[in-house]
Image (cartoon, rainbow, N blue to C red):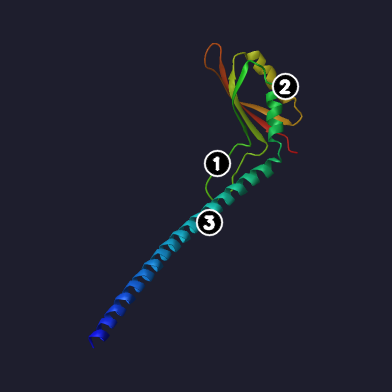
Amino acid sequence: MKFGLVFILIGLLFNFFVFNYYFEAVHSLQQTSQINQTTKQKLLELNGSVNKSQKMVDDMLKSSSSKSSFYVNAVIQGLPNSILLTEVNYQPLLKRIKSGQSIETDHNTMLVSGESNHSESFSKWIADLEVIDWVEKVEILHYEDTSTLVSNFSLKLIIAHD
């Protein structure tokens, strides 16, 4: 009887240790699974965000028909040394970029800003821009003498439709 009772207690103790070992193993695996699911969810969200951004970039590139570098190069090529450009913006945004919405740009437009220290060369450069075959119109948006030597300007080039 004593032997049977000791045997049952030893069996229960052994069962407790085995059960405890497997319970901790299952608990550890559940935690790992939860971490993996959370990581997978974040990865899917980031992948979706990257895909949206890539689509926006692709849409921008398709809309410009890859002529942006051609237009910018043509504007800069005839630039006199007395003019320093501070901004060249091909197809500027019409409104702020919002998540999940398409990017709206001012197609067939290029904004050019900078400084000039010689008004005659600035006027000649404007005249040269006006005779370029793909330039439909040159608008001077802003021209201001900031000092006796330097003037700030902003131009809007309207590009002829292809």
Q: Residue furthest bottom?
A: 1
Taking 53 as reference, is 158 left or right?
right
- Type of residue at label 2? Asp
Residue that label 2 marks: 128
Task: Please determine whether, in this image, residue 122 is positioned above or below residue 47.
Answer: above
Picture coordinates of residue 65, whole percent (x, y): 71, 41
Residue placed under numbered mark 1 in the picture? 95
State which mark lies toward you, 3 or 2.
3
Residue 98: x and y, percent? 52, 46
Q: Secondary structure at mark 2?
A: helix
- The mark nearer the N terminus, 1 or 3, is 3
Question: Could you tell me residue 14's position as x and y percent?
Answer: 32, 75
Asked if disc 1 and disc 2 are in contact, CB closer than 8 Å, the reply is no
Q: Decide if residue 101 is in sight here.
A: no
Number of numbered discs overlaid on the protein picture: 3
> Which element type, helix, strand or loop, lies under badge 3?
helix
Residue pointed to by mark 3: 44
